[in-house]
Amino acid sequence: DTGVSQNPRHKITKRGQNVTFRCDPISEHNRLYWYRQTLGQGPEFLTYFQNEAQLEKSRLLSDRFSAERPKGSFSTLEIQRTEQGDSAMYLCASSRQALYEQYFGPGTRLTVT
Amino acid sequence: QKEVEQNSGPLSVPEGAIASLNCTYSDRGSQSFFWYRQYSGKSPELIMSIYSNGDKEDGRFTAQLNKASQYVSLLIRDSQPSDSATYLCAVNKGTGGFKTIFGAGTRLFVKA
């Protein structure tokens, strides 16, 4: 099966702009996760979907972040009014029902200038 | 106290040696434990998962879990230069939840 894909791979934006990232999970995986990773740190949990339902969202996430998975397939992560502190690698992962083993996509590297 | 703690390293071992990577976690209710490998500039790649106390072997890798001590380790036998990477320990928060917490990772260097 094909792996998790993410688009775009790189995004440079100016502070204050909105950005949207897309994640396509492995086809038979019904669970989808978003993480953020900065240099020297492990991935930081942002949110999680089971099918189309968003079941958990990090308290660290401000109201500027929103994620959707409208048909239980691909997901989008939107960041509104970007700040320089949002610069990071945004990772998407997926897993099968009843298994917690997550498989990561290549990530989207965001740079806010 | 961090929820998942790892020594940041770097850990340097000669080629052919055994590399030992360690991880401790704070939530006693944690049920699932994972090791990921991450090369510089790449995304994490799953190496091992372990769910019950004891050892689990897969090729040159052995994961060890001790829930009483809240300790997970990864042994890499016959280390190769291609094993040089950051190794991330990840812990699932337990029943009823799917949030996975990652440690900051241990950098491993295998010297040829």
Image: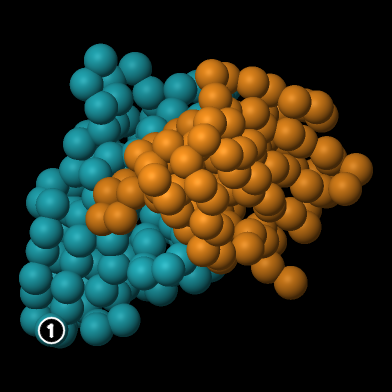
Q: Is residue A48 visible?
A: no
Q: Relative to the observer, which residue lies in front, A86 or A51?
A: A86
Front position in the image: A65 or B35: B35
Residue at image position (58%, 53%) is B101
Chain letter of the residue carrying label 1: A
Percent coordinates x, y for residue A73 in the rendering: 27, 29
Residue B66: percent from the left, percent from the top?
83, 39
Amino acid type, callout 1: Thr
Q: Which residue is mark 1?
A: A113
Is A17 left or right of A96, judged from the image as shown?
left
Crowd tier of the residue under label 1, counting other residues whose Cα lies within 10 Å: few below 14, some 14–19, many 20 or above: few
Q: What is the x, y in percent for residue A17?
A: 12, 77
Q: Nearer the viewer, residue A112 or B23?
A: B23
Q: Residue at x 82, y 29 (%)?
A: B53
User: Chain A appears what colour?
Assistant: cyan
Q: From the image, which quarter does the N terminus of chain A lie in?
A: top left
Please identify the quarter of the rendering in which residue A80 is found: bottom left
* Residue at the spot 37% in from the left edge and 68% down from the top edge: A38
Number of marks in the rendered image: 1
Q: Does the rendering let one see residue A13?
A: yes
Residue B1 lies left or right of residue B48; in this view the side is right
Chain identifier matching the orange colour in the rendered picture: B
